[in-house]
Amino acid sequence: MDMKKMMKQAQKMQMELARAQDEIKDMTFEATAGGGMVKAVALGDMTIKSIEIDKDAVDPEDVEMLEDMVLAAVNEALRGVGEASSSRLNSITGGMNIPGLM
């Protein structure tokens, strides 16, 4: 394969990766815990957009359970971001490990 063709393919892959990263950044990922009593929404850039807590989940006698539900919902939402990112980027790179992408 000649160098010019390889460079052209690399540039195309770079543009596709940039487009995919922009798409992922704008996606939202929702997760719940405690049977829906806590809901977390994460954005594709790994930030938390919102957390909703049902008033019935608030028990002053058991704050630890509420904390656990919040952590579970947040971690699950962020896991969704990671899985979507990996899947989308792997589809472009063909599974090649490119440092700095993830």
Image (cartoon, rainbow, N blue to C red):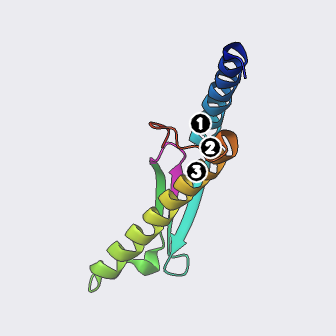
Mark 1 → mark 2, Cα distance in angstroms: 8 Å
CB of mark 3 within 8 Å of CB of mark 2?
yes
Give me the residue at 42% from left, 79% from top.
Answer: 57
Three-letter amino acid code at the position of disc 1: Gln
- Earlier-in-chain disc, 1 versus 3: 1
For residue 41: magenta?
yes
- Earlier-in-chain disc, 1 versus 2: 1
Circle 3: element type: helix
Mark 3 → mark 2, Cα distance in angstroms: 5 Å
Position of residue 44 in the picture relative to residue 57 (left or right):
right
Give me the residue at 67% from left, 29% from top.
Answer: 13
Q: Give the residue at mark 3.
A: 86
Three-letter amino acid code at the position of disc 3: Ser
Report the disc number at residue 89.
2
Give me the residue at 69% from left, 46% from top.
Answer: 91
What's drawn in magenta, residue-wise?
40-47
Mark 1 → mark 3, Cα distance in angstroms: 10 Å
Q: Give the residue at mark 1.
A: 21
Q: Position of residue 38 (x, y in %)?
A: 48, 71
- Label 1 Cα crowd, 10 Å radius (few <14 / some 14-19 / many 20+): some
Q: Position of residue 46 (x, y in %)?
A: 46, 47
Compared to residue 31, the image places residue 64 above or below, namely below
Q: Position of residue 62 (x, y in %)?
A: 29, 84
Report the disc number at residue 52.
none
CB of mark 1 within 8 Å of CB of mark 2?
yes
Compared to residue 34, the image places residue 94 above or below, namely above
